[in-house]
Structures are given as C-alpha cells and as structure tokens.
Image: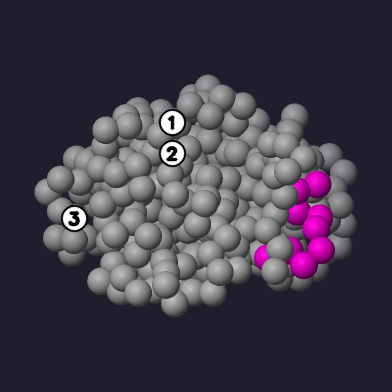
Amino acid sequence: MESLNTQISQDITHLAFSDESNYNDGKFRAISVISLKRESHELLANELKKIAENKEVKWNEINGDSKRTKIAINFIDFAIKYANLNRIRIDTLIWDIADYRHKVAKRDDKQNFQKMYYHLLKNIITKRWSSNGYWHLFPDEHTAMDWEILKDFLGLSVNSHLLQEKQQPQLDFIKEIYELKELNIKQISQCNSRDNYFIQLADIFAGIGAFSYKNFHSYRSWKNEESGQQSLFTTNTEDEATKSIKAKSKVLYELDSMSKKYQLGVSLNSSRGLMTRDPQKPINFWLYQSRSIHDQAPTK
C-alpha cells in the first residue's frame, strides 16, 4: 500500500479500485468499484490496513472462520462509516443471467462482462462525481477484463498495435467504450488484491451483492434461526457450505443493519437482494435491467 502513492501522477484527482464476483459462473454476477478523492486515500488506506491485520480478505474465503468473518464485518463498518461521511463511494453492479437480456443463445460472458464494466465506470465518473476530475483506475489483476485493450483505446498503452491486431468480432464492444475517451481516465494500473485493501473491499461488496440475491432464502432462514424461529438449517452437523452461508449471512446482516442505521437507502428484504433505489446514495447496489428490447447480451 505504501508504494501506491508513487504510482499516482500529480494531476490525478480521483481514484477507483475494482473487483468482480463470478463473471462467468452462477446465476448472479457482480462488479464493485470503490471510488474516492485522491486526498482521502492515504488516511483511509492505512485504516483499512489496520482492520485487515495484514491478512488478505476475500469474500469466497469467508467460510465459518470467526477471524475472517470478524474482519469482513469490520470492513463493512469501515465502508458504511466513510460512505456516510461522503469520503468514499461504493457502486456495485449486479446482473442476472436468467433475465430477458441474458437468455440468448451463445451468450459471450466475457464481452458482456466488459460491457457491464463500462456501464458502471461511465455512471460513476459522469454521474456520481464531479465531471472535471482526473482518474486513476486500480482494477484487480486477476480479472477477465482486457485492460490492455482499454488502455490502448484511451491512448495510455505503449502497445498501440493491440487494437489493430484484434479480429473484428472481438471489437464489437468498442462502441461501448468510445465515450470513455471523454471521461478523463489518465492511468490504469492492475494490482494484486493481496497488496491492496481497497480492492479487497471491492471484492467483498461484489461478493455480497451477488450472494444477497442467490442466497436470499438461506439468509432469511439464518436470520429466523438467530431470532429463535424455525430454520431451514435443521441438521445438528453442518457441512462447509452451510458454515460458509451462515458466516456470509452475518456479514450481510451487518451491512443491512448499518445501512438502515445511517439511512443510506439500501433495500434488502423488499427487493429480495441488495438494491439502492437512489443511485446518488454513496452505497449503491444496482441490479441491471434491460433498457430496451434491443439491449441484449452480446453473443459469440
């Protein structure tokens, strides 16, 4: 984390850290972006580092271990605290591959994932922050997103031949990113999540977004069990999957409770998954819905 500041040029005003969950697996998939002003970064990064206790926090590894669960809950509390103070934004885009847009033959999940990334970045930069900012993006390096192509398109890559070498069917997404040229993205640096706690925070929010829809019934059953009501978890012995769902449900409950405490406008029960009805709110869960009959997932 200490070396990150040396990568940021002097003209940068805003930073964005991103990660995804299940881009090509499962019914619900998600991308989350943590964005903040540059001057807030060092203080908040150091606080996150202390919370993590030098451990890497990943959503998929919250499996019943009390230490990991506690750290994840503390990450949620950190996010709510600073979002409420308007020091950070957390925007999470979730999509359902069983909806009208995605139920198409030969769906191209990788290209669809790229389009979702562009939708989310465009909304964050143009609608959620001042339009005259200069951005440095820090995506997780382990991703299906072709960041080198985007960097090339934006004139940020030394490999300027990449676009010309791609086959035209692979370039259908170019029209989706054309407007990003106007968004003042000045730098893109892929990072290992192990070394960046904001990317770990993005991983937790992407994971919890997808989990809230996929496992809503299990979450509600866990909540009933905690309150002494009948539960779906009826066995005395728990397998690893059940332990994982219970641990993740605790983290989801913390997010739901803290969002209500600070009146952040995040719904869970009424929407049967996390949703923010006012996207200007600093914690924004966006369940993507087709904008027209022509808005369909790309195909191979």
Residues 132 and 260: in front is 132
Residues at badges 3 and 2 in contact (C-beta under 8 Å)? Answer: no
Q: Answer whether residue 11 is magenta in the image.
A: no
Q: Answer whether residue 107 is magenta in the image.
A: yes
Residue 119 location, x and y as percent?
A: 53, 45
Does the rendering let one see residue 34? no
Location of mark 1 (residue): 127
Rounded to the nearest whole Å, what is the CA distance between mark 3 and mark 2? 20 Å
Q: Earlier in the sequence, mark 3 or mark 1?
A: 3
Q: In which quadrant of the rendered image does the N terminus lie?
A: bottom left
On residue 8, which mark appears? 3
Residue 274 location, x and y as percent?
A: 65, 39
Q: Mark 2 packing: few (<14 Cα in 10 Å), some, or many (20+)?
A: many
Instruction: Name the element at disc 3.
Output: loop
In the image, which residues are magenta?
Answer: 100-108
Location of mark 2 (residue): 124
Instruction: Name the element at disc 1.
Output: helix
Q: Is residue 202 above or below residue 266?
A: below
Q: Is residue 157 above or below residue 287?
A: below
On residue 138, which mark appears? none
